[in-house]
Image (tube, rainbow, N blue to C red):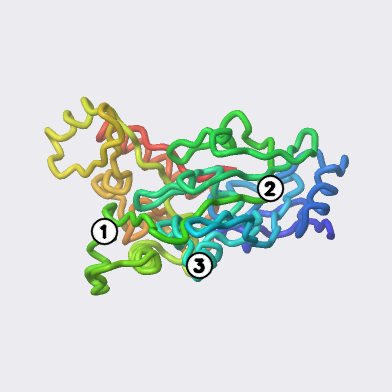
Amino acid sequence: MQIKQNISLKPYNTFGIDATAKYFVEVKNLNELKNVLELPEYPDKLILGGGSNMLLTQDQNKLVIHNNLKGIQIISENNNSVVVKASAGENWHTFVMWCLERDFGGLENLSLIPGNVGTAPIQNIGAYGVELKDSFVSCEAISLIDKKFHTFTNSDCNFGYRHSIFKLQSKNKYIITSVTFKLTKQQHKLHINYGSITTELENMQVTKPTIQDVSKAVINIRESKLPDPKNIGNSGSFFKNPIISKTQYNKLLENFNDLPSYPVSEDTIKIPAGWLIEKAGFKGKRFGDYGVHKNQALVLVNYGNAQGSDILKLSKLIQKTIKRLFNITIEAEVNIL
């Protein structure tokens, strides 16, 4: 374990922003992590996982700790289900593929989501009608305050839409070190009615889909819409889908009869933020080295050497425009640093 100085964070964030860490260290086991946290000479610390859900708008004058804890293990299993524990530094998609190779079901709709396992509970990542909380059992985390390890159950995490306890009252207070899931081994429950999964399965000529087929359909859809961060810097969906009242939704229908929606409750409706952004004219719009992706309006992109402040400025322009046109507030899904 070595603490380095003045390290470029460009390889460590999927937006490809060339910000600098004044101090940088990579930790590969729990002892290294605990030792680093106890260093008194670095009071300010930033935890970095896969770098997929962040926008760096400035250099980081603190100790950046790259969480690179690895390992996947089966904790228990029976004929119907299996409990699997994955370390925080495991790549999320790689972990999903590991589960699918063993015919463990529950995470297939979350295929190809960028980032690492450790950051997944923070956002309660979700896609195509499935959220992490649906199969989440618990996570282990180390406190930045007392340097002790704690276990958070599903109910402890207070999961909501792209929300958890780690985004509010426990924000920046813990580092997640591992996550445990309960997955199915047979009688898998397929979620194929959200988005265009059914259509993609038809295109694949699949009539009796397996969890592997659902994963492949999700991958095909995501690859057709979302740019690969290795080629074009991005963090996936930049904005959350807003949830509005049914009254406001009905009023919007008067002017926008093609407005797509997904019921959340009897009184609330979820509106696709991508549709709002596209309707506002931003889809495919480019501003020099940054812009909105041509295939998915939810994705803001760095075409080369954009600064984080450029992308932040664009996001605020989009938010202001959506508010003016639709009277809807859309929130950023990524962390602005």
How far apart are labels 3 and 1 at the CA level? 21 Å
Q: Residue furthest bottom?
A: 205
* Mark 2, secondary structure of its residue: strand
Of labels 3 and 2, earlier in sequence is 2
Circle 2 residue: 47
How far apart are labels 3 and 2 at the CA level? 25 Å
* Mark 3, secondary structure of its residue: helix
Q: Quadrant of the N terminus?
A: bottom right
Q: Nearer the viewer, mark 3 or mark 2?
A: 3
Classify 102 as above or below 67. below
Circle 3 residue: 97
Of labels 3 and 1, earlier in sequence is 3
Q: Are marks 2 and 1 in contact (CB under 8 Å)?
A: no
Q: Amino acid at mark 3?
A: Met
* Mark 1, secondary structure of its residue: loop
Name which residue lies at 42% across and 61% down.
186
Give coordinates of residue 52: x percent, y percent: 54, 55
Q: Nearer the viewer, mark 2 or mark 1?
A: 1
- Residue 196 is labelled as 1
Q: Amino acid at mark 1?
A: Ser
